[in-house]
């Protein structure tokens, strides 16, 4: 799946900044009838599918409302820096209280927390829905039913670190073969096992479209090795509420349960892997979920 980057935009900005600055200084931002500025820039974390999905959804919704929406892809550090300088207006994928806590501690005084729109973000160990176990403390004794394998993702991921340092030693899974390669490789293994009707155990996380595409269940984690669920928050830049009073209200009221999010992600990411033109897919998803979408701008 292709991801857009800021490289071209930054290069262009570096060349034209001086030429534009004089014009920008005297120009007034165009305003909609609802009091919001018409142009809005949403910052999207590279590779974070739930943020891509939510941002593409809001781009479509706001475009219907007359906004001119730009999505800019970047890593978290420059996103939070850019929010404090109003280079970005808002981002929709801040995980709290753990994952992005350091950024909020550093930059939070110049940001506005618009609230959590999903409260079910967490690391998981998932198995096929009809697997004969329900808890991680049953996995070691039934490892042979899963081919003595636990299928992981990228070796450098935080999920791999938690699995290696916490899950495996706590639940005595050292005798299982722990495979790490990549998220696409894990999904390929999951697809093959599902098609063959075989048991499989994989490292996964919520939200992810696999929960909509495959019959899965999370193994219980009685020892808490994978941590608690986090909330996914929207954060505005320092002038966001002043520049976008109506949109700020909409985002404060924005909620999306995991099943809806899974279905949107599945539609976007489990199709043509070579395309990052999500607009037609999102447009169809909106048509199929119009009752929900209309609540976003009530």
Image (spheres, rainbow, N blue to C red):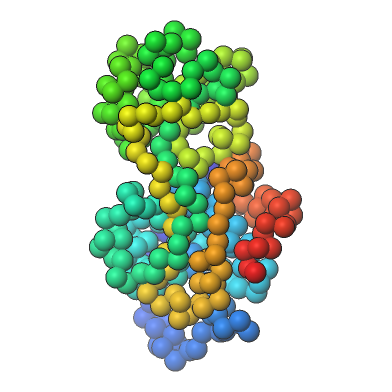
> Where is residue 284 drawn, in percent x and y?
72, 51
Pick the front one: 107 or 137: 137
Location of residue 139 by image quarter: top left
**Relative to 95, does residue 8 appear above or below in the rendering?**
below
- Locate residue 213, reporting x and y percent: 61, 33
190 or 229: nearer the viewer:
229
Q: Is residue 163 left or right of residue 89?
A: left
Question: Is 142 placed above or below 15 here?
Answer: above
Q: Residue at x 26, y 61 (%)?
A: 105
- Residue found at x 62% / y 63%: 296
In this view, the residue farthest toward the bottom is 26
> Is residue 3 at all visible to an observer of this figure?
no
Q: Residue 29 placed where, x, y %?
A: 51, 84
Q: Looking at the image, how many numbered discs can be counted on the residues?
A: 0
Residue 221, percent across and down?
Answer: 39, 29
Q: Which one is in front, 58 or 18?
A: 58
Rendered-image quadrant of the C terminus: bottom right
Quarter of the image where one finds residue 247 = bottom right
* Image quarter of residue 115: bottom left
In the rendered image, is residue 245 in sight? yes
Residue drawn at 49 percent across, 64 percent down: 42
For image coordinates 37% across by 14% down, the residue present is 140
Which residue is at the far front? 222
> Compared with residue 69, is residue 201 higher up or lower down, i.e. above or below?
above
Question: Is residue 295 shown left or right of residue 106?
Answer: right
């Amino acid at each position: 799946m292709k991801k857009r980057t800021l490289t071209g935009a930054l290069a262009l900005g570096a060349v034209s900044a001086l030429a534009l600055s004089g014009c920008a200084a005297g120009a007034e931002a165009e305003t909609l009838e609802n009091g919001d500025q018409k142009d809005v820039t949403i910052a999207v974390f590279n590779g974070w599918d739930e943020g891509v999905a939510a941002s593409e959804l809001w781009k479509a919704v706001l475009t219907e409302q007359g906004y001119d929406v730009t999505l800019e892809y970047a890593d978290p550090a420059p996103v939070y820096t850019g929010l404090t300088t109003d280079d970005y207006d808002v981002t929709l994928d801040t995980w709290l209280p753990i994952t992005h806590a350091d950024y909020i501690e550093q930059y939070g005084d110049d940001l506005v927390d618009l609230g959590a729109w999903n409260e079910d973000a967490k690391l998981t160990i998932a198995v096929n829905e009809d697997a004969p176990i329900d808890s991680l403390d049953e996995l070691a004794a039934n490892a042979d039913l899963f081919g003595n394998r636990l299928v992981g993702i990228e070796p450098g991921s935080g999920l791999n670190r938690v699995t290696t340092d916490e899950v495996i030693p706590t639940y005595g899974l050292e005798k299982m073969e722990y495979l790490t390669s990549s998220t696409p490789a894990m999904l390929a293994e999951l697809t093959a096992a599902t098609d063959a009707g075989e048991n499989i155990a994989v490292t996964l996380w919520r939200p992810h479209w696999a929960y909509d595409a495959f019959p899965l269940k999370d193994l219980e984690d009685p020892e808490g090795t994978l941590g608690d669920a986090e909330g996914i928050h929207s954060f505005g830049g320092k002038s966001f509420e002043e520049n976008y009073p109506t949109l700020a209200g909409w985002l404060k009221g924005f909620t999306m349960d995991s099943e809806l999010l899974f279905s949107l992600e599945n539609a976007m990411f489990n199709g043509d892997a070579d395309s990052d033109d999500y607009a037609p897919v999102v447009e169809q998803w909106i048509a199929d979920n119009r009752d929900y979408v209309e609540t976003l701008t009530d």
